[in-house]
Amino acid sequence: MSQSLTSRTPKPKYDVVLIGGGIMSATLATLLHEFDPNLEIAIFERLGRFAKESTAAWNNAGTGHSAFCELNYTPEKPDGTIDITKAESIAEQFEISKQFWAYLVTKGYIQEPKDFINSCPHMSLVFGEKDAEYLKKRHDKMTESSLFSGMEFSTDHDKLREWIPLVMSKRNKSEVMAATKMDMGTDVNFGTLTRKMGRHLLEDSNVEVFLYHEVKDIDPKENGKWEMKVKDRIHNHKQQVAADFVFIGAGGYALPLLDSSDIKESEGYGGFPVSGQWLVSHNQDLVEKHQAKVYTQATVDAPPMSVPHLDLRIIDGKKALLFGPFAGFSTKFLKEGSYLDLPESVNTKNLRSLFGAWWHNIPLTKYLIQQVAMTKSQRMQHLREFIKDAKEEDWELKVAGQRVQIIKKDEKEGGKLEFGTEVVVNKSGTIASLLGASPGASTAVYAMLNVLEKCFPEKLHGEWKEKLLEMVPSYGKKLAEHPELTEEIRNYTKEKLELEY
């Protein structure tokens, strides 16, 4: 660990302060520095390394979310048609991320793209006549869009055995199964990517990074600026730091920090922490037989983030298989947080929201209780729906990151659970926060451009526009409406990121 990251003292004032050292803050800092290298920017991270919480490789599924395989993004409407609006939107958002990463590689800011992104087919797999019909309709609808051209569909056991031999082993030939496959899917190590960006910021920019520094409170000043209490966790020293613009990218801790700012837009928000667990196998004989990410339908009453999937993971050059997620519960808002996080987050402004969300989601509460009570043997039974002869000794249980499911004020129900990613910005555009989980890291570049659109609109569409189009050539265009541009962009990112589909 660099001496300068632990012994330096922050300045009393910055143009921009970013809270948290995850994918969001690293992305925003890199964007802002590219737009204006003279900006005085500080990043405060409470732990000793970037990307140790939700962004860490084993704390998320590493799916480059492109809506190729996630069935919850393509609901069936009451009239039987498939709505792909959300799927197209998420696919476009991931294309934005890939363009930005390709730009960083082209400029030499980060090297060795295979360290963080690798080709990995994305598949949807369903069981039974009814779901097979749905998947066929979904495939027919999606392949009308240039974003999903090349998606294959099959119900043929021999073809499925080619695609997913591990899953097809010991299957009864009479079992009705259907799958789709997109070869241009990816597996992403967001932790490595974040640390590569962090290294670039440290070595090639004037962005100041402070590890083991925790922002404890954010207060508005009369002059429109923000004042933060920053604690140096190594030397137990506290000081005040002011900034013109603040971004809260602190994962589960974003909610209490946003609440401390007293902005009107934060009123009524609550949070419910959910942890995840995976079954992980490093058995290379199994890995060789499963070279894809395979998603299926969520069970009844399960939240969208709990869709079962069996994935190839490539972390630090090593391949493994991951199955889950299984829900866990802790009152912590971060993996390395405090058990008092949840009780301390309850206040008079969000009590109605929290109660309303609980009252309208009692089946979800039951689901979480059942998940938490599961033994490893019971989890293995779920895995055997995918791998018929899965053996307990080949799999270990790994705890993933903490996620805080956002609860939003709702006039009718009191409070409503939100499963997406949400950007909260105050009226004057001087403070912004990212809340929520899925699709999260995959759409970090889109989310951070969204922050800039809300907080620096004149600059983004003025003096920064040329640089923006250099970083994200498709910015401002709907790729679904421009098939030729989609192909051009995908060829460009495939080459720069050394993808192999």
Image (cartoon, rainbow, N blue to C red):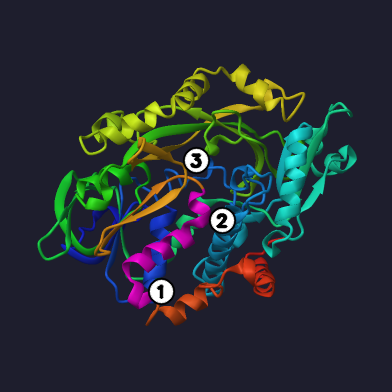
Q: Position of residue 280 (x, y in %)?
A: 61, 33
Residues in magenta? 439-460
Residue position for label 3: 59
**Residue drawn at point x = 57 percent, y = 69 percent:** 478
Image location of residue 436, percent across then percent down: 42, 45
The foreground one among 154 and 53 is 154
Precedes in sequence: disc 3 or disc 1: 1
Tell me the tag on residue 43: none
> Does residue 446 lie above or below 50 as drawn?
below
Q: Residue sitting at 69 percent across and 74 percent down? A: 484
Residue 86 in the magenta stretch? The answer is no
The residue lying toward the viewer, choosing from 404 and 127, is 127
Quadrant of the image containing the C terminus:
bottom right
Residue at x 23% of width, y 58% of height: 8
- Give the structural element (helix, strand or loop) at label 1: helix
**Number of other residues with Cα within 10 Å of mark 3, as a class: few under 14, some 14 to 19, many 20 or more:** many
Name the outermost residue toward the front: 79
Determine the CA span between mark 2 and mark 3. Answer: 21 Å
Q: Is residue 496 above or below residue 305?
A: below
Q: Which residue is mark 1?
A: 34
The three-letter code of the residue at mark 1 reads Glu
Q: Which residue is more in the foreground, 449 or 481?
A: 481
- Going from N to C along the chain, the mark reached first, 2 or 3, is 3
Residue 173: % across, % down: 89, 29
Q: Report the residue marked by disc 2.
A: 90
